[in-house]
Amino acid sequence: MEQCPICNAILEKGPKEFKQEAKEKESKGGIIFTTKKFVPEQKLTLKRDVWNIREGLSIFGNSIMAYIFIKLLIIMLFALQTPTYGTIPLNITTILLSQIPEIIFGVYPLWYIYTKRHAFKKLGFYSENRKILYAFIIGVIGAASLVFINMFSSIFIDWMYNSGIKIYDVQKYITEQNQVIQNSDVIWIILLSSLVSLSAFSSEIVFRGVFHNTLKSYFEGSITGRIYVIILVALTYSTLYLLFSLPIGIYFFLANFLYFLVLGVLYEINNNIYNTIVATIIYNIIIILIIYFNINIPV
């Protein structure tokens, strides 16, 4: 009761009412001034199952820095092993070791979620049996779509060559890489498939689990916002790949953009990161097998 029924005097609030009022104030939150504008406090509050923009971009940026550091470290080690400090030799060992930066790529977000005791669904992991089954079905369909994009990539590279755009002899590089894989023993192919699968798992954690979900939370999950997020993530991935693999990345920019557009759509079907992980793993293994058995289709 807030008022006495006899004398109409205002009564003091009891402990329960104080707690209820405190909860209401906490749920409403305040505002925080960030450089140029006021932002609702709720948008910057850490939550167990949803990224806020600062948190998510920080984790994404730290993951990128870890990737760059490990990649540079491996390049330096290879350079020291090369007597003339020239081009890094292309063999099965260098191909395998090239997967290490991407495998380590996703360790930091997992460590962050674990140490903060946040829910893994913050990264998009939903492990219910039905969702796993859906993820496998969606992943198989998605992998087929990615194979078609790979075929398109080969056609696009041929078109660039025929148009006189020959910045780098990428066809020679692809041929040499394919020959290395074809001449390798089965045990190396199994190891390569395993490492590539771990790379796919790690990459999806960073780009889908962290970056995609952060932007999606920022745009508050609207349909228009989801379209923006899919495009932004695809553009970011293709741009980073371009920068980290110059000049080869120039020829794969469009293919990588389309590749990540498809993965973004797959993820948005039911917001389960297993969709894209399954699709990427199946796609990578298919491409490795096509190369190893020298199946005569455009790859």
Image: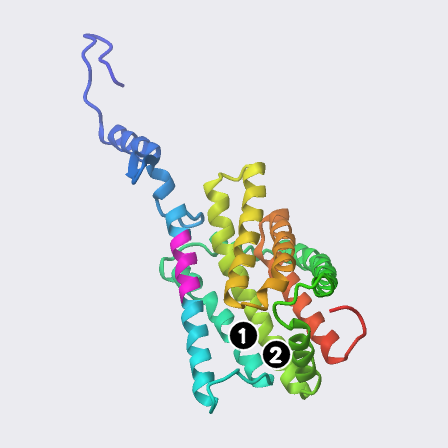
Q: Is residue 36 left or right of residue 188?
A: left
Q: Amino acid at mark 1?
A: Gln
Residue beneath the point at 32% across and 31% down: 24
Left or right, 76 with respect to 258, comes to left
- Element type at marker 2? helix
Residue at the location (51% across, 60% down)?
Answer: 240
User: Where does the N terminus fall, quadrant-wise?
Assistant: top left
Residue 60 drawn in magenta: yes
Q: Is residue 50 above or below residue 285?
A: above
Residue reaching furthest right? Answer: 296
Q: Residue at x 47, y 56 (%)?
A: 120
> Reading the chain from its start, which is encountered first: label 1 or label 2?
1
Q: Where's residue 270, x and y in %? A: 61, 48
Magenta stretch: includes residue 38: no
Asked if disc 1 and disc 2 are in contact, CB closer than 8 Å, the reply is: yes
Q: Main secondary structure of the magenta part?
A: helix
Q: Residue furthest front?
A: 164
- Quarter of the view holding residue 177: bottom right
> Which mark, by number, is residue 99?
1
Whole-percent x and y of residue 244? 50, 66
Q: Quadrant of the rendered structure where residue 152 is?
A: bottom right
83 is higher (above) or lower (below) than 167: below
How far apart are labels 1 and 2 at the CA level? Answer: 9 Å
Q: Nearer the viewer, residue 257 or 165?
A: 165
Q: Which residues are magenta?
A: 57-65
Quadrant in the picture for residue 18 = top left
* Foreground pick, 279 / 50: 279
Farthest-out residue, bottom: 83
Q: Which residue is mark 2?
A: 192
Q: Secondary structure at mark 1?
A: loop
Q: Is residue 101 left or right of residue 25?
A: right
